[in-house]
Image: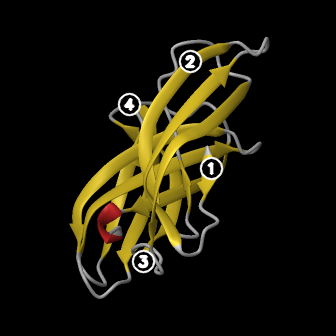
Amino acid sequence: AEVRNQNSLAAARNADYEIQFRDRAGKTIATRRGSTYIYPGETMHIAEVGIPSAPPVDVAIVFPRVEWVALDDVGPDLIAGSREYAIEDDEGLRRSVVTAAITNRTVIAIPNIMISVLIFNQSENLIGVHRTELESLDADETRSLRFAWPGVIAEVVGSIAVEARSPEFLP
């Protein structure tokens, strides 16, 4: 789910969410709960994997509890660039791989960075997710990262989103 905080002066320090996955009849076939944070004006994705049933035809997300805090600044200035998708052959095993460069454009080191790669098909449906964590990224540092799947993603890749986020600037 793509989530956007339209507030320009408030961050959600803690936002509990519930995602409901429904079948053709509208019956909930799976539910996932979690919590996240979001900076003022930020757009981010919440992705849940391993839904143990047939693919859902409808997904709903609700936020039953959100803890808002005043924040007149945006989040850490982390950018993802040089996104590239490839299919590599590793000793006879073919796999999907995304490489990306993550840059810290601030003047201080940023700790606890979660990087998510989201792959969408040509219809904008999510077809692949991968995550990793960086302990820290120094000021003005760029780091290249490689994300590998255990096999080849079965659909044609339409677009790739790479999100680098850290909760460290929240009050």
Secondary structure found at label 1 = strand
Secondary structure found at label 3 = loop
Mark 4: amino acid: Gly
Q: Position of residue 94 (x, y in %)?
A: 45, 34
| Real-space CA distance between mark 2 and mark 4, rounded to the nearest whole angstrom | 36 Å
Mark 2 or 3, nearer chain start: 2
Name the residue carrying label 1: 2
Name the residue carrying label 3: 77
Front residue of 146/94: it is 146
User: Splitting the image into 4 quarters, where does residue 146 fall?
Assistant: bottom left
Mark 3: amino acid: Asp
Mark 2: amino acid: Ala
Residue at image point 70% right, 12% down: 27
Q: Determine crowd level at label 1: few under 14, some 14-19, many 20+ residues with C-alpha closer than 10 A.
A: few
Q: Position of residue 121 (x, y in %)?
A: 69, 42
Circle number at residue 92: 4
How has the structure been colored for display? secondary structure
Q: Are marks 2 and 4 in contact (CB under 8 Å)?
A: no
